[in-house]
């Protein structure tokens, strides 16, 4: 009987193991099958004219992605993006979802060009898209189109347009020529003649008299013959007003560099290229009642390039140059100190050498001090605190030498000199540190051989005693472990299938309850989409950054409208959006709220806006507005 009981127990244990293994395999297969359904692809038109914008899209199906990395796009100008849109479909009870990332591009030249693979992270795995080939054809002229009356549009009536055909818009190329004096970038340097190593500042400014839809530095300057240090600009800076040739311009500084010439001669200062989109009010030739009064807003992409500049760099004078001069240019202080002038053998002493001031601190070499041979010297510990601002590099460099005397006696640490060139006075200056007398008492050291070279590395000394482990003299304790079948781990594995089953049942019931509430489910999905688009704006709301908050709300709202109404970013305007919303039967109240929100965001760019409570109110308005449009616009 005992043998039979043991066999039955063994069989029951084996059955439990098989059940656990089977459930585990089912979960693994389910995860693999769900991941295998994820698909990441790229799409774009096969052929586009050179003077037309087009859309490059990356679509992720049946997966949650992060860290989207588009390929390097060199043959096209990036006008906007990525704009994100999400869609879900129910077909025969099966749910499919997709996320699309859209970029607005414009060709630079004619020909056939290939756009490389993009990548995205899905469940910790990197997925790559396909490559896309786009053929860029010759520019096409804006052609007159026959206008047909829409019987369902109350404003599309011969009474308003006189039965005449609408005239085509002015081409972007013509408008760009007209705007060249209203929108441009300019390079300016604060000095035209400097000494080698003397700092000068290069400033890149954008001047504009029209409304802009942002700007982008398409090609940053590359400086030849200079060591450059970019100056960090205030992200909250606002445009200022400057007058050039009797015309007032709004201007904003987009880049600023501190430059240090490394060779003499006539050195050019590199230009940079900037891309922007100008919003131009174009008067319509149509007799439409509204067009004759307000015209149309046309988006004109412009590629701008700064002027050239040349700086005369002079060699440093040879007259009066000190023998120890090592290239320091600026205005400096040189200081040394000693922690102890009396010590015993094997007691550490710190010798500090400090250089501070304003100039080319990154290139300053400290003088090398000489110490008595009876001192063990370690490599110096360097401390650096250098700031880069519009005034140039300033701060200090400090070198701390650790000295350990090994023999008693009286010693001297010799003085050192430091020299620099001051551009404002065109003179050399030299400072000499004091000489230090050190008295060492005690017995000769037995720790380290006094013949050890002074230049021994501190890290090598620190390793002494670490390469031999001490012998353990105590008797180790051995404990007898418990059986695995009586452990908590076994109990957890044994109960895991039941807990998993209960969790799945509860999740299924919850999903069924949510699915029954159709209206509530649609509202939750709409609010989730709106919150995703406004996530960056929510961060600025938390920090109280008003300007960037309204900028992100405006960006998210326009991006949502472009995706929802299938309008290119370059063609978005209030008039186009209102026309589309009316056609799609959006409520007048919703359209009025949308106009008010967009006007508030535009006003926030150039004038103070409300307090934190009003920012929270406008954030809620944007959230509910997107949710309402999801319900009303199909």
Image: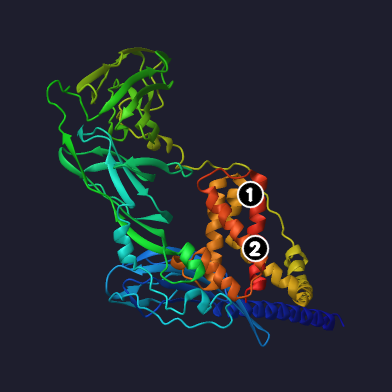
The residue at the point 67 percent across, 72 percent down is 631
Q: Is residue 130 visible?
A: yes
Q: Is residue 611 left or right of residue 135?
A: right
Quarter assignment of residue 626 = bottom right
Q: Is residue 502 left or right of residue 539?
A: right
Residue 340 x %, y %:
42, 15
Residue 572 x %, y %:
48, 66
Task: Say what secondary structure mark 1 lies in.
Answer: helix
Q: Which mark is residue 615?
A: 1
Quarter assignment of residue 382 = top left
Work out which residue is located at the far right of the displayed protein and give it: 1
Q: Are marks 1 and 2 in contact (CB under 8 Å)?
A: no
Q: Is residue 231 visible?
A: no
Disc count in the image? 2
- Report how far apart the C-alphas of labels 1 and 2 lie in the structure: 15 Å
Q: Is residue 481 above or below residue 457?
A: below
The N terminus sits in image quarter = bottom right
Work out which residue is located at the far left of the displayed protein and give it: 319
Task: Check disc 2 and report the residue beneath it.
Answer: 625
Task: Say what secondary structure mark 2 lies in.
Answer: helix
Q: Is residue 198 left or right of residue 436?
A: left
Q: Is residue 136 left or right of residue 580?
A: left
The C terminus sits in image quarter = bottom right
- How is the model colour-coded? rainbow
Of marks 1 and 2, which one's residue comes earlier in the chain? 1
Residue 156 x %, y %:
53, 77
Q: Residues within 10 Å of mark 1 (few under 14, many from 20)?
A: many
Return the residue nearer the eye: 327 or 60: 60
Return the residue nearer the eye: 193 or 413: 193
């Amino acid at each position: 009987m005992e043998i039979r009981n043991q066999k039955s127990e063994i069989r029951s244990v084996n059955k439990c193991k098989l059940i656990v293994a089977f459930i585990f395999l089912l979960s693994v297969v389910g995860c693999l099958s769900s991941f295998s359904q994820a698909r990441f692809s790229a799409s774009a038109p096969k052929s586009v004219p050179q003077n037309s914008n087009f859309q490059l899209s990356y679509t992720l199906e049946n997966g949650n992605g992060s860290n989207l990395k588009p390929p390097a796009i060199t043959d096209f100008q990036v006008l906007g993006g990525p704009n994100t849109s999400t869609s879900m479909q129910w077909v025969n009870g099966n749910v499919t979802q997709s996320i699309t990332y859209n970029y607005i591009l414009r060709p630079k030249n004619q020909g056939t060009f290939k756009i490389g693979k993009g990548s995205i992270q899905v469940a910790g795995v990197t997925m790559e898209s396909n490559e896309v080939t786009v053929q860029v054809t010759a520019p096409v002229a804006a052609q007159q189109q026959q206008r047909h009356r829409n019987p369902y549009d109350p404003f599309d009536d011969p009474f308003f347009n006189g039965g005449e055909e609408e005239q085509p818009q002015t081409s972007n190329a013509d408008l760009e020529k007209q705007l060249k004096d209203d929108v441009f970038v300019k390079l300016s340097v604060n000095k035209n003649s400097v000494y080698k190593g003397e700092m000068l500042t290069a400033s890149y400014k954008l001047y504009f008299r029209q409304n802009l839809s942002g700007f982008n530095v398409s090609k940053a300057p590359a400086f030849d013959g200079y060591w450059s240090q970019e100056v960090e600009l205030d992200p909250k800076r606002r445009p200022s007003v400057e007058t050039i040739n009797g015309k007032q311009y709004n201007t904003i500084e987009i880049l600023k560099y501190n430059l240090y010439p490394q060779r003499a001669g006539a050195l050019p200062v590199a230009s940079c290229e900037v891309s922007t989109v100008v919003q131009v009010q174009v008067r319509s030739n149509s007799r439409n009642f509204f067009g004759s009064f307000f015209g149309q807003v046309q988006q004109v992409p412009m590629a701008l390039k700064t002027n050239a500049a040349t700086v005369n760099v002079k060699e440093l004078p040879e007259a009066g140059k000190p023998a120890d001069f090592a290239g320091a240019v600026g205005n400096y202080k040189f200081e040394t100190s000693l922690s102890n002038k009396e010590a015993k053998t094997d007691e550490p002493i710190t010798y500090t050498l400090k250089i501070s001031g304003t100039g080319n601190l990154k290139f300053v070499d400290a003088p090398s001090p000489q110490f008595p041979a009876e001192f063990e010297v370690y490599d110096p510990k360097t401390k650096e605190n250098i700031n880069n601002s519009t005034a140039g590099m300033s701060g200090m460099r400090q070198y701390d030498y650790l000295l350990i005397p090994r023999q008693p006696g009286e010693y001297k640490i010799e003085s050192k000199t430091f020299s620099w060139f001051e551009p404002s006075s065109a003179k050399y200056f030299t400072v000499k540190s004091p000489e230090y007398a050190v008295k060492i008492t005690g017995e000769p050291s037995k720790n380290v051989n006094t013949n050890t070279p002074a230049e021994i590395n501190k890290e090598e000394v620190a390793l002494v005693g670490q390469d031999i482990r001490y012998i353990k003299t105590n008797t180790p304790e051995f404990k007898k472990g418990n059986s695995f079948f009586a452990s908590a781990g076994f109990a957890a594995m044994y109960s895991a299938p039941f807990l998993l089953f209960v969790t799945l049942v509860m999740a299924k019931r919850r999903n069924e309850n949510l699915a029954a509430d159709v209206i509530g489910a649609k509202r939750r999905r709409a609010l989730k989409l709106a919150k995703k688009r406004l996530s960056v704006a929510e961060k600025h709301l938390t920090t109280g950054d008003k300007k960037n908050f309204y900028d992100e709300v405006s960006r998210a709202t326009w991006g949502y409208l472009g995706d929802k109404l299938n309008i290119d970013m370059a063609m978005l305007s209030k008039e186009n959006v209102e026309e589309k919303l009316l056609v799609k039967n959006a409520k007048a109240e919703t359209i009025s709220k949308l106009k008010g929100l967009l006007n508030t965001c535009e006003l926030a760019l150039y004038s103070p806006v409300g307090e934190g409570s009003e920012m929270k109110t406008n954030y809620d308005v944007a959230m509910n507005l997107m949710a309402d449009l999801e319900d009303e616009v199909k």
